[in-house]
Amino acid sequence: MRVSKRLFKIFGPILVAAILLLAVLLSPFSFGLNHVSKTTEETAAVSLSPNVLKGRLVKRQALSDNYVPFFGSSEWSRFDPMHPSVLAAKYHRNYRPFLLGARGTQSLTQYFAMQSVKKQLTNKKAVFVISPQWFVPKGTRTDAFGYYYSPLQTTDWLQTEKNTAMDRYAAKRLLQMPSGSSDKVLAGALARVAAGFKPTSAQRAYINYKARVLGSEDEFFSKFGIAGKNLKTVKHQETFLPTTYNYNALDELGGKIGKEQTTSNDLEISNKFWRTQLRRNYKRLKDSQTHLNYTKSPEFADFQLVLNQFAKNNTNVMFIIPPINQRWANYTGLSMEMIKQFDTKIRYQLESQGFTNICDLSQNGDEDYFMTDTIHLGWRGWLAVDQKVDPFLSKKQTTPTYKINTQFYTKKWQQLDPNDLNEFK
Amino acid sequence: MNETQSTVLSILQDLTGEDVSSNMDTNLFDEGILDSMGSVQLLLELQNQLGIEVPVSEFERSEWDTPAKIVAKVESMQ
Amino acid sequence: MMSFDPYGNPTYFILLFVALLPLMIGLLYGRRSHIYESVISFVFLMLTFGGIKWHTGIALIIYLIYQITLVWLYSRYRQRPDTPNKGWIFVVSVILAIIPLAVVKITPAVHHGASSIIGFLGISYLTFKVVQTIMETRDGTIKEFHPILFGQFLLFFPTISSGPIDRYRRFIKDYDSVPTRTKYLELVEKGVRYIFLGFFYKFILAYIFGTVMLPTVEHAALQAHGLSWALLGVMYTYSMDLFFDFAGYSLFAVGVSYLMGIETPMNFNQPFKSKNIKDFWNRWHMTLSFWFRDFIYMRLVFFMMKHKVFKSRITTANVCYVINMLIMGFWHGETWYYIAYGLFHGLAMVVNDAWLRYKKKHQAQIPHNKFTEGFAIFLTFNVVCLSFLLFSGFLDTMFFAARP
């Protein structure tokens, strides 16, 4: 019949396309599309692109090779010759940093980013930079969390949750984020987990379906849109370094470059940062930070999620606590006493649970050319980090033993005054 | 050529400055000979010279876009 | 309760297709069920105006009752045996029809951007339909008034949110008949093609221009703060985004109408190929510009010529161009840049007409070839893009918005 033929001509191609799309998205095969080249790994490792953080495939592949996850936030974008990625490439270390995090990523984002690479973290090493600035009274900003939110990581997490204290707390936090509760079915499942129940079987089926589709999408598309700009910068920065590694020579070089690039102000802040971010507001910012307090924050419990996950996967982690530019702190009136208290509290949370590899630089803020701007490590600061990180990653380490204390999820700990630490013990 | 036809053609010639009688099927809008302004003038002249009232709503471009169609329209309204 | 922006996501399209399937089978077998059409219209209107947006649904219902009553009263008046046709009654009716829209448009200007509670998605497009019906009733081209049919015309869901603006008589003709099978198959073929072209326009091209590129160039232009290459980038990127987004949406609306056996008019016809501004307005947002042409410009010219307001017909045309385009500017919203956009296009039409007259007079001296045509297209494109930069409000953000 002619009509049916005509109809097939109109709708046939759509039908075929729909069937193919469903087949591809729902099938467990990846059709060879999941190949990640070495170049892609190299680009992704320093790209700081949100899609790399939110994705799964590229991270998994790179971390299965010789890349080590470097969790952190905005400091990673400070690519100078002493940046960990530059040093590792220049001196052909047996590891390469895979930078995870950018401006606005905090513990909760990192916890979910870890969900897609749990296997790759198990019995491996990692580096984690703890920014004191995360620990503000309100904790993670919901808009920043939304920007880096990945439904794929949520389904990955939901598929493996065991309703531990960690899982219940994570579900509760996710529900507080608008992005985390945007999918109504997933939100329903999260609510059950937070309340101590398993997701219903219907919810479970939906989670599995969603995980399959999102996983396929990730395999097909996560390789695209990774910015290559930073890799160029890294390669360019390598050219400033001497051929052989010598700490004293590098330390001197760091001081020299720092001096050359901070000529526009008295705070030893890089000219670029000064010009683009600070100059216009400089006057207004005097004594503007006297009230800041990093000692009471929900972030302490979010950070516990990260520690708990590391412990579960038996990951050996080097934690870095960066300082604040002392000259800047003096100008804005930031309390150094408060910073010291923050340091005490966070170190207690780390050490009491067995996380003893800590590179604590919190008291080094007054060293020259240690910071590239107000709160970000640079030149000599990066080199100080390297002094700890390189041996930690290059040499064999004893296996850590962790003892997780779920009390760190409580409101009491979040809001505990560091002076009252004895009460908590 | 009847009277209506010649009146319509002379109105068109007055309006556009072009003699369209040789090509009765040329599209006046596509060729840029007639535009909205010209159409309104045409309607007004039809009213003045032939006494037929065409409301603007009745002016559907596709029904008035060639000299032949205009003549036919006018004849049907007389 | 689910709530959707029309044509916003895949779920909407899947629901739409499922709902249309019985209707399409019916049309294929020569049957049209107004009851079924009303049911799916109701469902899709609920999806658009229900859920968390329920208050806009209430606003829509009140608006509808108000306008149908208004047109019905005016129609009753015109159909009295002595066929009265007082000018002032007509003018008052049109003003009453426009008042709700005017309130919605003026509220943000006087209340610091707050939106009016009587507003809802698509109110301006419904107002066009109401006003044209009143005007045609006055002219006597619409003789009978059916409140139900008129309601169906206003609420035709594929076009309710942003047009294309159909005409009552044209719509009713399609709505009250069933296309032949051959004709309907042609409509389905075209409709499906339009919808898929719409996907390409809206979800790929508009995404690339609007979501990927625009923020980057806007950021660069804000950094430069003044005339810069980046600002030129904003101009072109925004223009492309505007076109592909709106043309994509219009293709959905027309395509879906076709599947329902209604030949809603097209809204765009390759506008960037225009050789001059007049040509452009015959290709860009056509149902809107034709509406303005038929119901404002031509009537204004008719009125002014009849009452000999100006001696010169050129002055008449020019004054009407500017008034026409200014009204369009005001219709977009009461901000300086929309009004400036209207004025810009009004003046562009005046210049355009002057050039066309000059060209006609000096036909012998002015060359006409492929190169001059190409240049005309290039020039028109850039003038249009410049007007879109004005329209975008980006200049307002750049120069007048409070800096963070």
Image (cartoon, rainbow, N blue to C red):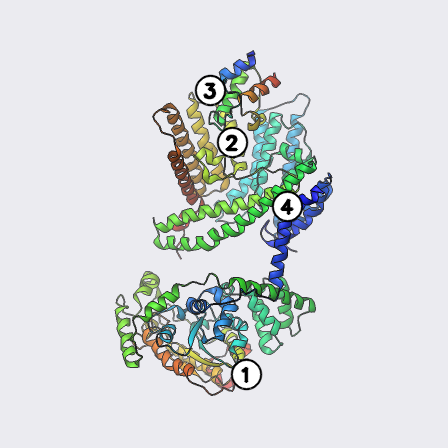
Q: Badge 2 is on which residue?
A: C293
Labels 1 and 3 positioned on one and the same chain: no
Labels 1 and 4 positioned on one and the same chain: yes
Say which chain tag 3 marks. Answer: B
Say which chain tag 1 marks. Answer: A
Labels 3 and 4 positioned on one and the same chain: no
Cβ atoms at labels 1 and 4 below 8 Å apart: no
Mark 1 or mark 3: which is in front? 3
Mark 2 or mark 3: which is in front? 3
Tell me the quadrant of the picture where the N terminus of chain B can be found. top right
Q: Badge 4 is on which residue?
A: A10
Give the residue type that dot 1 points to.
Ile
Q: Badge 3 is on which residue?
A: B15
Residue drawn 57% across the image and 44% down it: C251
Q: Badge 1 is on which residue?
A: A404
Can residue A125 be seen in the rendering of this structure? yes
Labels 2 and 3 positioned on one and the same chain: no
Dot 3 alpha-carbon crowd within 10 angstroms: few under 14, some 14 to 19, many 20 or more: some
Gap in angstroms between the C-alphas marked 2 and 3 = 19 Å
Mark 3 or mark 4: which is in front? 4
Classify residue A222 as left or right of residue C401. Answer: right
Give the residue type that dot 4 points to.
Ile
Can residue A297 be seen in the rendering of this structure? no
Say which chain tag 2 marks. Answer: C
